[in-house]
Image: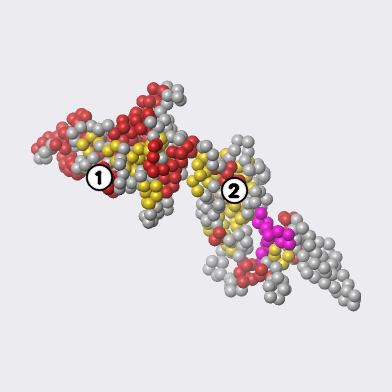
Amino acid sequence: MLRRRCKGIQRRTRLCVHTAVGPDIRSGRCAGGISEDGGPRAPRPRRIPGELRQATHPASGRPDAAAGWHSAEDGNMTMGANGSVRNRDVGWGGSQRLGMVVSGSLTEGMEVRLDADTSIEDIKVGTFVNIQGQHMRFFGVVTDVALASMDPALPSSPPDVSNPFIARVVSGTAAYGTITVEPMLTLGAGESVAGLDGPQPAKTIPPHFSAVGSATDEDIRVVFGSEDDRHFWIGSPLDMDTQLCLDIEELVTRSNGVFGKSGTGKTFLTRLLLAGILQKNVASNLVFDMHNEYGWQGTSEGATSTVKGLKQLFSSRVAVFTLDEQSSRNRGINPDYVARIGLEEIEPEDILMLRESLNLSEVAADATYSLQREFGRKWLGTFLDMSGGEEMRELASRLNVNDRALSTLQNRLRRLMRLPFIDAERSHDSVNRILDYVQNQDMHVVLEFGRYGSDLSAYILVANLLTRRIYARYQDLTEKAAGDSAQSPRPLVITIEEAHKFMSPGIADQTIFGTIAREMRKFNVTLLVVDQRPSGIDSEIMSQIGT
């Protein structure tokens, strides 16, 4: 048995286990020799490169089976008490071996069986790993961690593990851990870290029994780049000390999302990304700042202290707009512009976005288009000035709309129009002011909502209305440039929060945000969406958003 085990070890690792006395397993000859008195003599301890020796008990000095085996030359080779041998260094860039591929697919991910001496508690979802295939290496991320067993009866009849030796034997053999790895990229062939063209999207999978190891610093550098003129350091990978950078120039060419539960650092990461865009000067930002976190200052996670906002970090390149001047003054901020929305600027598309927050029926929301056809540009002001009763019934008859639906629509819109930043008398120049800062001055704009940030209807109305008009201007500027990149408008990244309210399945194909996400960078406008409910975003839109 020991001979067969040793031969297996030789084939895999070119290392051999030696006993303190008895036959030489490698040659079959007696290694002990004869002592002066004619009796058996204990062999002289032999050390060969890479040799595995059984650990001894610290008190008695005798072999300790429960402690397993260790390498005589380096600590990378270990042998468990169950006889398994694993080389912890899998041979490329210091990557530590975790296990081997046993099944999987490109769409569902690769199932990796963990080695007996790999603690499942040390592996977390989100950890980066690499897989050494036959002809190429893969870079992936752990998406799931699970426990498995070879014996279906094991979960219902677990063995007695009070004996540490039995526990060690069972663990990793009859019972073991698995992880699911999603292969993301191929990094090149063999020991090479990257091919001539750099990392490529994974379009195939490694074969059975491919070794899986922890990602190395070099892997992270090749995949994410090093900090330079176009790469911005945003943090470190899970359980690693190396720098994780993003290619900011590549980032602004498509719409991206920052998703996570409340308190997981979405605002902090978003602030970092915005600062990176500012620092590398690759695009302009327009931030619809719902909770006043990005302009002058914000709060750290837990709201225990304040952190500098973009205006403090880049004072000459950031303009702070506000819808609530009093709130800005109370916080000691002198805004660059106080934004207002004219009643005539509101269109049916803006009201359609408010259907859920205003609790409007589909009939009432769709009636806004009929009202615009009936009254023209001043449709909303005319409709709100109408009295009820007979006048409303006559209008409903002309539009072929239920009069109760019209009355409900009027009541809900009157409540919305009481917001102080909506001006019923005249239009305002907020869009042109934003475009002047963004295009002519190469600056970045943060629009703070002040006290109105808690009013979701106000946030949706303003963000949708301004974005729709700005995007229309970008379309005109891009078409006038006619392919001349020097004349094309400066790239613009629009940041919105509560994104699922703008891009839910029912309205995503009718909103400006859905249009921008689908068209990607067609007119040099992209989105940075922040949300804690990405499941509420239309699946087609999600497929176009990087995360």
The residue lying at 19 percent from left, 42 percent from top is 418
**Amino acid at circle 1:** Gln
Whether residue 72 appears in magenta in the rendering, the answer is yes
Left/right of residue 416 with respect to residue 121 in the rendered view: left
Residue 221 x/y as whole percent:
58, 44
Near mark 1 (Cα within 10 A), the count class, few <14, some 14-19 or many ≥20, is few
Whether residue 220 appears in magenta in the rendering, the answer is no
Report the coloring of the rendering: secondary structure
Near mark 2 (Cα within 10 A), the count class, few <14, some 14-19 or many ≥20, is some
Tell me where residue 84 sits by quadrant: bottom right
Tell me where residue 159 sits by quadrant: bottom right
Left/right of residue 442 with respect to residue 227 in the rendered view: left
In the drawing, what numbered circle is on residue 182?
A: none
Closer to the N terminus: mark 1 or mark 2?
Answer: 2
According to the picture, the residue beneath numbered tag 1 turns out to be 326
The residue lying at 55 percent from left, 70 percent from top is 157
Residue 30 x/y as whole percent:
85, 67
Residue lying farthest left?
Answer: 390
Per the model, the C-alpha gap separating discs 1 and 2 is: 50 Å
The residue lying at 40 percent from left, 28 percent from top is 489
Identify which residue, 150 or 172, lies in the foreground: 172
Q: Secondary structure at mark 2?
A: helix
476, above or below 533, in the image: above
Q: Which residues are the magenta region?
A: 71-89
Q: Secondary structure at mark 1?
A: helix
Nearest to the eye among marks 1 and 2: give it: 1
Find out whether the residues at labels 1 and 2 contact each other: C-beta distance under 8 Å.
Answer: no
**Amino acid at circle 2:** Asp
Residue 197 x/y as whole percent:
60, 35
According to the picture, the residue beneath numbered tag 2 turns out to be 217
**Mostly what secondary structure, the magenta segment?**
loop
